[in-house]
Amino acid sequence: AQSVTQPDIHITVSEGASLELRCNYSYGATPYLFWYVQSPGQGLQLLLKYFSGDTLVQGIKGFEAEFKRSQSSFNLRKPSVHWSDAAEYFCAVAHTGGFKTIFGAGTRLFVKA
Amino acid sequence: GAVVSQHPSWVICKSGTSVKIECRSLDFQATTMFWYRQFPKQSLMLMATSNEGSKATYEQGVEKDKFLINHASLTLSTLTVTSAHPEDSSFYICSAMMGQATDTQYFGPGTRLTVL
């Protein structure tokens, strides 16, 4: 069965520091992978997605993620975090192009001045 | 583009009443819409998949008679929580996909339901 693991419940980084949020998935075939961000009381915004091709994916707001099949990982990175990046981040895996998306438990990002 | 709205954004109701939540795709036609439920500080759990003009497909453990879903048009899906109880209090989020060939879900802002 498909599953998504985000090992870190919460992470705190200093503003301007680099960020890496971890995501591991379990899926039989090549997965469709997503990262979403959710601000408090809001819906989800898509940061980036991977379907095929280049394993390094660029997204919005300066985020990128790298698909590593050998490690079953799709970690999200940002070279320099801004205070406005504080939010909940969800990794997700989908079968057949977005249908029945399975979400990870989320990682809460705190940014300190 | 690709904006999804939900109405209301929050609702408080008495136990035993029914509540309807609307999900609209504002600038595209959504052949498929999804309804999720999110408990505080937890992830999203898919409740059902809704295709325009057909019955919704519910996930295991979701009571179809309690959570009525209607997808009457390509831009509107509704979720009705019938005979709501305090345990139904949650954050409900819908998403929409524009066509079979598209792989991206666009999410609404969510509806906070509180049942007293």
Image: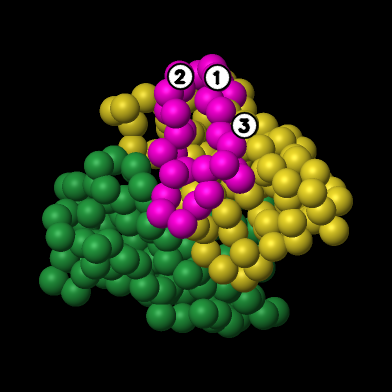
Is residue A21 among the parts visible in the rendering?
yes
Q: Chain of mark 2?
A: B
Tags 2 and 1 in contact by the CB under 8 Å rule? yes
Residue for badge 3: B78
Secondary structure of residue under mark 3: strand
Q: Earlier in the sequence, mark 3 or mark 2?
A: 2
Q: Amino acid at mark 3?
A: Thr
Tags 3 and 1 in contact by the CB under 8 Å rule? yes
- Taking B12 as reference, is B52 above or below it? above
Q: Does A70 lie within the magenta span?
A: no
Q: Chain of mark 1?
A: B
Is disc 1 on the same chain as disc 3?
yes
Q: Which chain is green?
A: A
Residue for badge 2: B53
Secondary structure of residue under mark 2: loop
Residue for badge 1: B72
Query: Where is residue A65, by image quadrant?
Result: bottom left
